[in-house]
Image (spheres, rainbow, N blue to C red):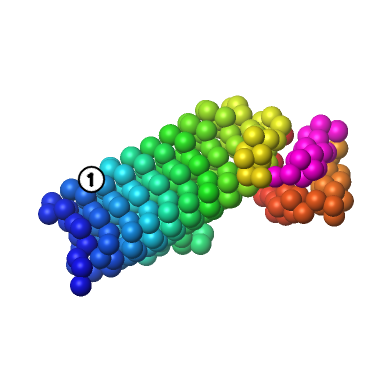
């Protein structure tokens, strides 16, 4: 059986489950209750503590800390988890913490995410697929970040916020409320600035769908409607535009209120 390509200076707990194709760089530390699937490349000076499960084909750069205890004063060493999916790029000095028993007990990162240097993902966050977190962006605890969302560099997201699919934030944004799908947000605190037109074009949205999304944005932010009135208007548009389904669902489940 082929052995993992582990540098002789790395420290790997005997109970860690590591596929034979995994590469682990110099001075990295892999603790107990860690499972690492095939195709992962782990750089030097990386620390991974368990319980943590890492799917296939991720690249983890040097000096990242994954699966450390949550930064929560209520934490009492409960066996909570970090789960990372497949084909993620995790750059230098990232910190991902495990969950807490006050929530799902799991911090979850999906597939195909591009996570740049110095990103912090706190306890109980749920990050979807195909997201981008630029340098120094941070998620406080209990944040949901949905598919294809992009956080500009130094974006800070308050605890319990939700970031909708296809959202993009400007550099240095501070997010205190939920950002609905398709919205561009910027500022301190973050405010809506139209829809993410360029991102939608790149992902193949039709001109007709984009027109309907712009109409929904106007109903939400430009037409002087209350939130309940806007939700009713967007629900009507959804009949002819399935792409608005995620917006309708998001607005029906916001708990912190949306950026306005």
- At 58% from the left edge and 43% from the top edge, which residue is drawn? 149
| Residue 2 to residue 49: above or below | below
Asked whether residue 180 appears in the rendered view, the answer is no
215 within the magenta span:
yes
In the drawing, does residue 152 fall left or right of residue 95?
right
- At 76% from the left edge and 40% from the top edge, which residue is drawn? 207
In the drawing, does residue 234 fall left or right of residue 122?
right
Of 192 and 20, nearer the camera is 20
64 within the magenta span:
no
In the drawing, does residue 218 fall left or right of residue 115?
right
- At 59% from the left edge and 50% from the top edge, which residue is drawn? 146
Residue 169 location (% of width, % of height): 58, 34
Asked whether residue 96 appears in the rendered view, the answer is yes
Characterize the magenta stretch by its predominant secondary structure.
helix
- Where's the N terminus, which quadrant? bottom left
Residue 201 location (% of width, % of height): 66, 39
| Residue 233 to residue 168: above or below | below
- Where's the C terminus, which quadrant? top right
- At 42% from the left edge and 51% from the top edge, which residue is drawn? 88
| Residue 185 to residue 244: above or below | above
Highlighted magenta segment, given as a residue range:
205-224
Q: Give the residue pinned by disc 1.
A: 45
Q: Residues within 10 Å of mark 1 (few under 14, many from 20)?
A: many
Q: Secondary structure at mark 1?
A: loop
Residue 122 location (% of width, % of height): 44, 48
Residue 241 location (% of width, % of height): 80, 51
Of 143 and 180, nearer the camera is 180
């Amino acid at each position: 059986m082929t052995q993992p390509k582990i540098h002789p200076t790395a420290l790997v707990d005997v109970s860690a489950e590591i596929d034979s194709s995994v590469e682990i760089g110099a001075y990295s530390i892999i603790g107990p209750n860690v499972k690492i699937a095939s195709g992962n490349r782990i750089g030097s000076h990386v620390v991974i503590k368990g319980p943590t499960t890492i799917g296939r084909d991720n690249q983890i750069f040097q000096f990242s800390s994954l699966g450390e205890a949550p930064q929560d004063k209520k934490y009492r060493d409960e066996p909570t988890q970090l789960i990372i999916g497949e084909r993620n790029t995790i750059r230098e000095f990232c910190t991902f913490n495990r969950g807490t028993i006050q929530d799902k007990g799991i911090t979850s990162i999906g597939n195909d995410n591009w996570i740049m240097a110095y990103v912090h993902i706190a306890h109980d966050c749920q990050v979807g697929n195909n997201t981008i977190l630029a340098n120094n962006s941070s998620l406080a605890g209990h944040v949901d970040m949905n598919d294809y969302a992009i956080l500009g560099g130094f974006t800070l997201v308050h605890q319990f916020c939700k970031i909708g699919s296809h959202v993009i934030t400007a550099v240095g944004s501070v997010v205190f409320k939920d950002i609905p799908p398709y919205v561009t947000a910027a500022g301190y605190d973050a405010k809506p600035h139209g829809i993410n037109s360029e991102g939608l074009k790149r992902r193949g949205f039709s001109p007709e769908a984009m027109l309907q999304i712009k109409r929904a944005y106007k109903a939400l932010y430009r037409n002087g409607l209350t939130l309940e009135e806007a939700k009713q208007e967007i629900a009507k548009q959804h009949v002819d535009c399935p792409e608005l389904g995620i917006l309708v669902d998001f607005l029906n489940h916001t708990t912190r209120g949306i950026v306005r």
